[in-house]
Image: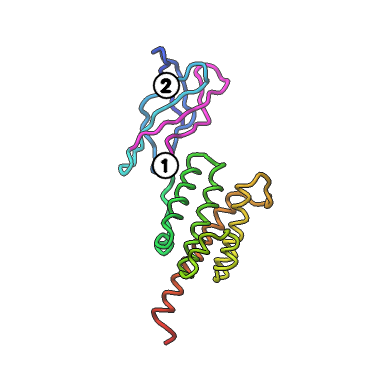
Amino acid sequence: MYKDTTAAMIDGQGVAIRLSTIPDTCPRCHRNVQPNFIVAAALQGRRLSQAVFRCTNHKCQEIFIATYDHNESGHPQISQNFRLAPISAPQISLPETVTAISPSFVDIYTQANAAEAAGLDQLVGIGLRKSLEFLIKDFAASEHPNSEEQIRKSLLAQCINTYITDSNVKECAKRAAWLGNDETHYTRKWDTKDISDLKLLVRLTINWIENSILTKKYIEDMGGA
């Protein structure tokens, strides 16, 4: 699907352009939509055009901009390879058990996901690594309240090895920490793994922590009867 339109230049003149592809996802609400086209502008001397759209989802209705690169076809200029802005990070669903023990983890994890949505790919792994440290230390402190001060001062690897007793949490957290460290160091150790593996390991750690907390709760509540 394409759209032929006239884009305004900065001097007020118009130029015919073709938007070769129309966005079908709103970068604000992340729903599939057929947005309303509002207006287009051509950036003189930069082979770029920008088009303003409005989301047609009634719960959103927000304005967003698609920036198109021009190809070499001449007149009318056919625009392709669009980039959308502003982009909102997708809403994240986290277990209540986890958000209760580590609000700081939630803040950092949310910001890491926002960085990914904004295309700041070099910052995502750093944010995930930091969020993992807060999650593990807060979980460990909740399990060992008498050692809270030592836990907070310990290195992440030391904290995992010393204070995390659930084997699933321990093994996933260790591997997430390894990949997280790769994201902060100049040389990568795990060159066959990437950010998707780190994201999955952090998510597994979250899930195992939830399982551990809920299992402990029901054992305590119901005993061995």
- The amino acid sitting under disc 2 is Ala
- The C terminus - image quarter: bottom left
Left or right for 180, reference 224: right
Asked which quadrant contains residue 87, the reply is: top left
- The amino acid sitting under disc 1 is Ser
Tell me which secondary structure the magenta stretch mostly adopts.
strand
Out of 76 and 220, give the one closest to the viewer.
220
Eye-nearest disc, 2 or 1: 1
Asked which quadrant contains residue 218, the reply is: bottom left
Q: Is residue 94 above or below residue 191?
A: below
Residue drawn where x is 36% and y is 34% of the image: 63
Q: Which residue is mark 2?
A: 41
Out of 125 and 140, give the one closest to the viewer.
140
Residue drawn where x is 39% and y is 29% of the image: 52
Q: Which residue is mark 1?
A: 88
Q: Is residue 90 above or below residue 36?
A: below
The residue segment tinted magenta is: 62-88
Q: Within 10 Å of the Cα at label 1, are there few (<14), some (14-19), or many (20+) other Cα atoms?
A: some
